[in-house]
Image (cartoon, rainbow, N blue to C red):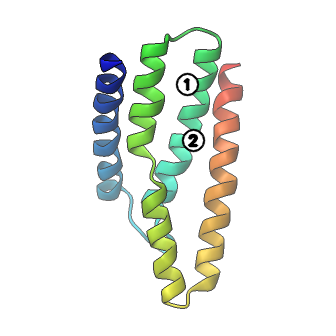
Amino acid sequence: MMKVFLLSGLGGAIGAMLRVAANFFVRTGFLPYPTLLVNILGSFLIGCFVALGSQQTIGTNMNTFLITGICGGFTTFSAFSLENMHYLNDGKYLQAIIYITASFMLSILATWLGYKCIV
């Protein structure tokens, strides 16, 4: 049990640092692109990691490190929710709808593509 906590914590720290790096290298424009990018990329990666785990290419410990840790620390639903709350509070309803739709559709598509790239 302690191994699972340590692996997910270490992966989470790495994922969180990568998440912060996205804010430095990706500019926010019409939409909060850093959050959109990490959620889509994280979804793609989690699809790949699930596929690798289902083929037993990676073990349970590595799966915990990659999926729960890195992907969990990297992607962010709370920031996504906050950004949409700001859009709604500012009356930017079109931007909120586009961002919500793009995030869900592209993240689900990316998860499927990541899985299909491996399987």
Name the spot of residue 28 as percent of width and height, x first. 41, 68
The residue where tag 2 is placed is 43
Query: Of the residues under marks 1 and 2, which one precedes in the sequence?
Result: 2
Name the spot of residue 49 as percent of width and height, x first. 55, 25
Give the answer, above or below, for where 30 lies relative to 80: below
Residue 72 - label: none
Left or right of 22? Residue 66 is right
Residue lying at 49% horizontally and 63% vertically, measured from the top left = 80
Left or right of 70? Residue 67 is right
Q: Residue furthest bottom?
A: 91
Indicate the secondary structure of the residue bearing disc 2: helix
Name the spot of residue 105 as percent of width and height, x first. 70, 55
Q: Point out the image quarter for the N terminus.
A: top left
Q: Residues within 10 Å of mark 2 (few under 14, many from 20)?
A: many
Name the spot of residue 70 as percent of width and height, x first. 39, 34
Indicate the secondary structure of the residue bearing disc 1: helix
- Amino acid carrying label 1: it is Phe
Residue lying at 56% horizontally and 86% vertically, measured from the top left = 92
Residue lying at 52% horizontally and 73% vertically, measured from the top left = 84
Residue lying at 44% horizontally and 27% vertically, measured from the top left = 66
Left or right of 74? Residue 50 is right
The residue where tag 1 is placed is 49
Q: Which of 92 and 2 is in front in this view?
A: 2
Q: How crowded is mark 1: few (under 14 residues within 10 Å), some or many (20 or more)?
A: many
Location of residue 56 (image quadrant): top right
